[in-house]
Image: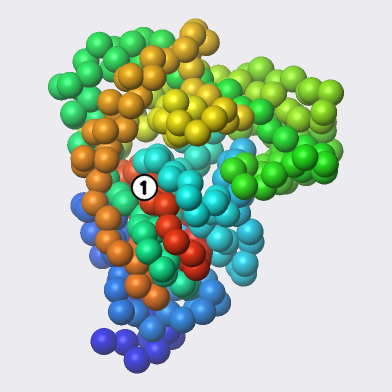
Amino acid sequence: MFPSASEVVEWVSKNKDWLEGQLIKHGVLFFHGLPINTAEEFNDFVSAFDYPSELYLGGGGPRISIVGHVMTSTESPPNFVIPFHHELAYVTKFPQRLFFWCEQPAAEGGETPVCLSYRVYDRIEKELPEFLQKVKEKKIRYMRLLSDKHAADFSFSYQRGWQDIFDTEDREEAEKRAKQSGTEILQWREDGSMYTVSAAFDPVVLEERTKKWTWFNSAVLLHPSIYGDGPRPWTSLYGDQTEIEPEYLKAVLKIMNEEGAALQWNKGDIMLVDNFIALHSRNSFTPPRRLLAAMFS
């Protein structure tokens, strides 16, 4: 359909309002067969939508900047399944639109399943009403232990160091940015790590454009019981800092998985996700696999 990346970019520029309308209607758009072959061309593609670009501080996911708006989607190990989540829903400032581009599909697995958050909310309301009432009343907090990236035992596998999370080497400035990102309790540990507990966030949000209630939080993503392979440097809590019952979160994850849909990545495929309307995840995979990403307001 399009013989060159430049023609794709030109088409997007002329049709971005229509594309935005389709995104709001469906929550996710999947582009297949476009002649987008390099990170630079992917950057041109996402830039053509003319979405506002901001620096999102507080996100722990390990990423590497590539070019322009483009970064790696995640550097988490291939065997690690990332459960359904809204990107950066555990901080105060989060992106609204997410792009993923497949530079190298996995030898096996590695899909990016998506599901509609309002459908997840509707099922929780019907199947787990007592849990929904509890989180509405108590809200949700997130506890994270952010390592010093200069520590001898630092691992980049699951979470960046606080220096990269808050884009500074200065502790005082890191504290300031952490609080701007929603941190309410902050303590420095002897090993140089930063212990944080967020303010209490509302776990459900009325999406203004669709007028639908969404399950907009990171309770599942940041609860250790979901992973089942040892402790993690994070957890989700009720707003009164009591523990969330793992059986509730596992039931929510089951609903997400049942509502989710996944397409196998092919080289050059692009996915655009509305972060308010849809959740996304990542299946484990057999390398090689390389997805690049870009985030916008």
Could you tell me how many numbered marks the image carries? 1
Under circle 1, the secondary element is strand
How has the structure been colored for display? Answer: rainbow
Say which residue appears at 66% left-offset and 17% top-offset.
Answer: 185
Q: Check the image and name the residue furthest to the bottom.
A: 3
Q: Position of residue 68 (x, y in %)?
A: 60, 67
Depth order, front residue of 113/179: 113
Q: Residue at x 41, y 68 (%)?
A: 107
Residue drawn at the location 55% of the way across and 77% of the way down: 40
Question: Which residue is depicted at the point 50% across and 40% down?
Answer: 88
Quadrant of the rendering where the N terminus is positioned: bottom left
Residue 248 in view of the camera = yes
Give above or below for 245 relative to 36.
above
Query: Could you tell me if residue 92 is visible in this image?
Result: no
Q: Residue furthest left?
A: 126
Q: Amino acid at mark 1?
A: His
Q: Quadrant of residue 21?
A: bottom left
Image side of residue 198 versus residue 136, left or right: right
* Mark 1, other Cα within 10 Å: few <14 / some 14–19 / many ≥20: many
Residue 156 vs residue 17, the one in the foreground:
156
Q: Is residue 105 above or below residue 109?
A: below
- The spot of residue 174 in percent (x, y) is 75, 35
Residue 197 appears at what percent x and percent y?
A: 61, 21
Relative to 74, 116 lies left or right:
left
Q: Residue 101: x percent and y percent?
A: 43, 67
Report which quarter residue 270 is drawn in.
bottom left
Which residue in the structure is indicated by mark 1?
Answer: 280
* Image side of residue 32 versus residue 286, left or right: left
